[in-house]
Image: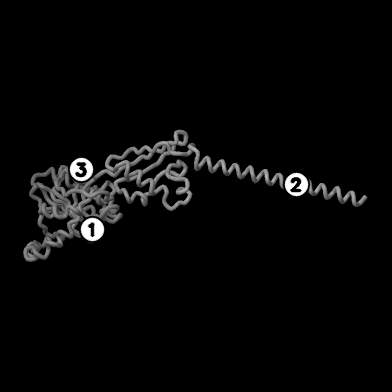
Amino acid sequence: MAEIDAYVQESHKRRKRRRAYFVFISVFLAVYFLLLAACWLVLKSPFFRVSSVVVSGNKAVASSSIRDLLFSRVLRGKSLNALLGFGNILIWPKELDSADLVFLPQIKTLSIEKNLGDRKVTVTVEEREPYGIWCLMARTDADSTQTGADSNSQLNVASSSEVDLGLSPRPSAYSQRESASDSCWWFDDEGFIFKRAPAAEGSLLVVVDDYSQDKLGLNFKVLPPEFIPNLFSIFRVLGAGDLNVKGVELNNLALQELEASTYDGPKLYFSLRFPADYTLQVIESFYSKPGFGKLQYLDFRVENRVYYK
């Protein structure tokens, strides 16, 4: 009897093992085929294949250049993205960051919208708008320093008031700007340099001749970040008044000062250390009085004060 019971128990154990093996194999095959189906769906099926890429908002930058940038940035450094391929809608990010946009500095922002139903990718571009031109004059000025040493030494003999103001007489020759035209750059309303610019001068456009810096270029800002807000406050003042601005110069960044000259009025001296918005009312007050054109300068380099001659 004991032998029969042992046989029955062994038979039950074998049946349980067979059922367990069967369940395991069934689950394994089900998972395998599900994974196989998912891989086919993602990699080979048309459900996630991009049907079209539409680029909008760009005027200066060619759509082909933007697509080339997207191709290199979307697949960059990610093996899964490379496996899925550029045509798979799942790998597309929502936007490109500033580090990706250094290759196309004219683009300020680039956002990406994916429509899974239509398998359509819409790329919206915001381009940088030109605010003014920044010309590096340091190298050109240095080239002329040696040949004009004698004449410059004579020009530097100025009155005591001019010496106190830190004036440095400089020939205002348009040929200087022309010879430095390869170092003129467009900048936007954030002071960001994004494109080469032609040599220019006049009151219709903000043009700054920089005699201090010599190492600016694409993806740079025209000044250190702490000076940018105050720089644009100066531009607002020059643009808001009735001044006929001839030119703007940065002679020495270490002094943190900016000089503006006018065609029919005095020179204006501003500081980059604080905002210049308050100076507009002062300038308008002087402008409304007789003899404004006879003034030599208005000096705003001390905050909330003006010195004039």
How would you rate the neighbour count of disc 3 (Cα within 10 Å): few for under 14, some for 14-19, many for 20 or more?
A: few
In the picture, measured across the screen, residue 124 lies left or right of residue 287, that is: right
Disc marking residue 97: none
Q: What is the CA distance from the residue labelled 3 to the residue labelled 2?
A: 90 Å
Residue tagged 2: 18
Q: Amino acid at mark 3?
A: Ala
Which residue, given by chain and number where applicable, does mark 3 sit on?
240
Task: Residue 142 in the image: state x and y as whole percent.
Answer: 15, 62
Q: Quadrant of residue 87?
A: top left
Give the labeled residue for mark 1: 256
* Helix, strand or loop status at disc 2: helix
Q: Is residue 228 left or right of residue 206?
A: right
Whether 177 is drawn above or below 59: the answer is below
Q: Furthest residue to the right?
A: 1
Q: Quadrant of residue 255?
A: bottom left
Could you tell me which quadrant the C terminus lies in? bottom left
Tell which tag, 3 or 2, sits nearer the viewer: 2
Q: Is residue 193 left or right of residue 71?
A: left
As shown in the figure, which amino acid type bears the numbered disc 2? Answer: Arg
Distance between mark 2 and mark 1 Cα atoms: 87 Å
Question: Which amino acid, mark 1?
Answer: Gln
Nearer to me, 292 or 154: 154
